[in-house]
Image: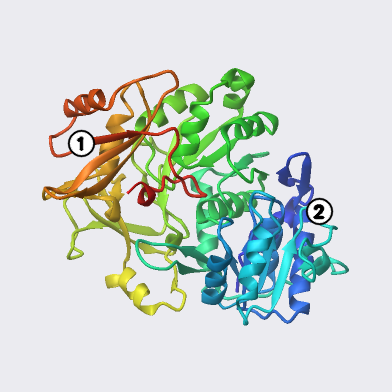
Amino acid sequence: MINLAVLLEDSAREAPAKTAIIFNDMKLPYAAVNAAANQIANGLVSLGIQPGDKVALSCPNLPYFPLVYYGILKAGAVVVPLNVLLKGREIAYHLQDADAKAYFCFQGTPDLPMGQFGYEGFQQIDGCEHFFMITIDPAGPSPIEGTKTLGQLMYGQSPAFDTVATNADDTAVILYTSGTTGSPKGAELSHANMIFNARLSDTMYGRVENDVHLVTLPLFHSFGQTVQMNGGFYNQAALSLLPRFDPDTALSIMERDNVTIFAGVPTMYWAMLNHPNPEKFDLAKIAGNLRLAVSGGSAMPVEVMRAFGEKFKVEILEGYGLSETSPVATFNRLDRPSKPGSVGLPVWGVSVRVVDLEDKDVAQGEMGEIVIKGHNIMKGYYKKPEATAEAMRNGWFHTGDIGKFDEDGFLTITDRVKDMIIRGGFNVYPREIEEVMVTHPAVSLAAVVGVPDERHGEEVKAYIILKPGQQVTEDELIDWCKGCMAAYKYPRAIEFRDALPMTATGKILKRELR
């Protein structure tokens, strides 16, 4: 019998006065976070929320997120974190699909009225009985008349609560993932899935006194939720929360809060590396405090990794995983030399293979689909047995990612199956081309996609962001690429952009470029 909330409770018992959350000038100790989560749990139980009920949560990286998250878990219910960019119709789909009984939604801002969108979605679903507005001012009224607030739910509730005992294989969290096709699917992750993955932090970054994480990865996403929030709370670290990443604010917080651990996606590293006014910050202080940088979510260009490491005096360690794997499956470990460009070795208790179309292992160095088995694999997609069976063929989770193993067992991600370009019968892997293009002295960032072509089926096109003050023409860059790669690989079309479309987690939206 174990509940994911133990990660918070144990640290609150062992280190009640240690800072758990930093937000601007606010610092909340572990005891206060645990007490607030207990009040929320008491409030939910008083409303009739039962163990196993689904409770949705829409909230950016604010102190409210962990309070509500662990409060839901303590009550024995299942957390359903939602992307904060969803609109009313999309929210209604998630609430309906998850069978949510209650829904907590942050009120948002004039630019992003999350509360308005959330209430619109809630009103469309008969089975969702309770709506709670998370207000900017915890004591303030809801901006939507007639709706209750988180503050009202907590008011008068005891700060003590006897956490509901759950089984290791009970569902703790349902994380929605778009996958490769169709409507978003809810990956059911058990308490054991999530606890084991959080405790992988022992080998990923270890427990160091007074560690401070900068948490700008969205907490509704598996990377920030497990690696930083759950792993950080397990290790009694302080989490400095940044609701929306921008390089200026991130560097300011790293300087102000003496950040020791930063985790991000490659575009975040690229943005900090290319800050137009780095002299604004004490980079020596930032570099002196930063002991670990972690990258995941998508492939890190080796050139960005090298340049960031030189500037901030820290090694970026890449890992790999998916929502369905809780998420971590492989990582470049601290106890042995890492391999830049690889996503490391399988983590403890997890097996990884690279297979062909018949699920047979390919030879070392050859590319194939990555399949995974271990304690980190989801129970399945909620209410979608056919999709679950398709993903879990022959007892292994099929990721849809293409990769290869080297002679030392390190895994390299080549591409997504869906991103692979087939040009005239040849397989073209966009990441390989992107890695080459960012070594051009004028190129800052590259995204390569396949576009329809009558002659070859697909043609290779690159979208490019140039470095400040640099210029190069399309023809010049194409000619340069010709000299660097095989004839079937180099891009035949190049489009220069000031920015590229990205998800809330900072991944480049290649489907929009396509």
Query: Callout 1, which amino acid?
Result: Arg
Q: Earlier in the sequence, mark 1 or mark 2?
A: 2
With 148 as the anchor, is 511 left or right in this view? left
Q: What element carries label 2?
A: loop
Q: Where is residue 298 in the image (x, y as percent from the top left)?
A: 40, 46
Q: Where is residue 56 in the image (x, y as percent from the top left)?
A: 62, 68
Q: Quadrant of residue 44?
A: bottom right
Residue at image coords 68%, 66%: 104
Q: Is mark 1 on a helix, strand or loop?
A: loop
Residue at image coords 24%, 44%: 429
In this picture the colour scheme is rainbow
The crowd level at tag 2 (other Cα within 10 Å; few <14, some 14-19, many 20+) is: few
Q: Quadrant of the N terminus?
A: bottom right
Residue extending farthest right: 156
> Where residue 492 is drawn, which disc sits there?
1
Query: Callout 2, which amino acid?
Result: Asp
Instruction: Report the residue marked by disc 2.
Output: 137
Q: In which quarter of the image is residue 220?
A: bottom right
